[in-house]
Image: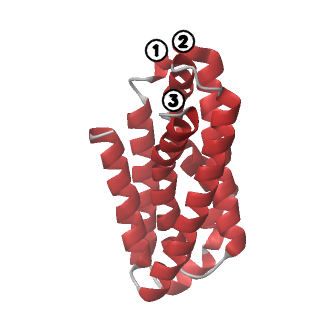
């Protein structure tokens, strides 16, 4: 198998968390918002790249220290954001409209961190299988950006069809958190 195919397979597998969260965010927004889709996609790609590079350059020290906690940290962040979405779903529509700050900088940082924390170990793994970290990172960032963008757009479409979009988005984030904690 060529290095490009290896990198592409790694990229798609790594971007699945970001894709799932992007769908939930698109559902949460409930209306088409290309600026939000770009912001979310850029944030997820940036965090994924940053975590890989940190993992790659700090190597075994970081992997040994964080490897036992990455899934738990991601679970806690996704659970808290998912529960917040469900809480907002239960509120009146007027309250939700007045709280359109959900997609603020801090929430996107938390989501970016939650979807990419396990990539610290991936950065180390890339060095062990002799793949060029810079080529790998660029390809992975592009795939993550594109899948995240498609996920948000898909979420917009689903959100337009359902009036319980925040409930669905919250359940999706919580499910992803449990998946990361129990299976990943």
Picture layout, residue 2 above or below residue 162: above
Q: Residue at x 51, y 49 (%)?
A: 15
Question: Which quarter of the rendering shows the C terminus?
Answer: top left
Picture layout, residue 27 above or below residue 112: below
Report the Cα–Cα distance between label 1 and label 3.
13 Å
Tell whether 173 sits left or right of 134.
left
Among numbered discs 1 and 3, the one appearing first in the sequence = 1
| Residue to which mark 1 is pinned | 64
Q: Are marks 1 and 3 in contact (CB under 8 Å)?
A: no
Tell whether 136 sits left or right of 168.
right
| Residue to which mark 2 is pinned | 61
| Residue to which mark 3 is pinned | 122
| SS label for mark 3 | helix
Report the Cα–Cα distance between label 2 and label 1.
5 Å
Q: Residue at x 44, y 73 (%)?
A: 166
- For disc 2, the neighbor class at 10 Å (few under 14, some 14 to 19, many from 20) is few
Frontmost of labels 3 and 2 is 3
| SS label for mark 1 | helix
Picture layout, residue 38 above or below residue 95: above
Q: Are marks 2 and 1 in contact (CB under 8 Å)?
A: yes
Q: 128 or 56: nearer the eye?
A: 128
Report the Cα–Cα distance between label 3 and label 2.
14 Å
Q: Position of residue 34 (x, y in %)?
A: 69, 74
Q: Residue furthest top?
A: 61
Q: Residue at x 60, y 43 (%)?
A: 140
Q: 176 or 76: nearer the eye?
A: 176
Task: In the rendered structure, find residue 144 and report the number of the disc placed on it.
Answer: none
């Amino acid at each position: 198998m060529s290095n490009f195919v290896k990198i592409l397979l790694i990229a798609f597998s790594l971007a699945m968390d970001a894709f799932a969260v992007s769908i939930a965010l698109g559902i949460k927004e409930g209306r088409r918002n290309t600026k939000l889709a770009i912001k979310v996609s850029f944030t997820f790609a940036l965090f994924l790249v940053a975590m890989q590079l940190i993992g790659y350059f700090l190597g075994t020290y970081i992997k040994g220290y964080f490897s036992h906690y990455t899934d738990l940290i991601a679970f806690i962040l996704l659970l808290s954001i998912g529960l917040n979405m469900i809480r907002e779903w239960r509120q009146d529509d007027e309250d939700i409209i007045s709280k359109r700050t959900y997609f603020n900088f801090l929430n996107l940082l938390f989501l970016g961190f939650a979807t990419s924390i396990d990539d610290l170990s991936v950065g180390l793994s890339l060095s062990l299988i002799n793949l060029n970290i810079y080529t790998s990172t660029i390809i992975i960032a592009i795939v993550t950006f594109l899948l995240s963008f498609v996920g948000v757009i898909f979420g917009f479409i689903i959100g337009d069809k359902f009036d319980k979009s925040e409930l669905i988005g919250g359940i999706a984030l919580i499910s992803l958190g449990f998946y990361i904690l129990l299976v990943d």
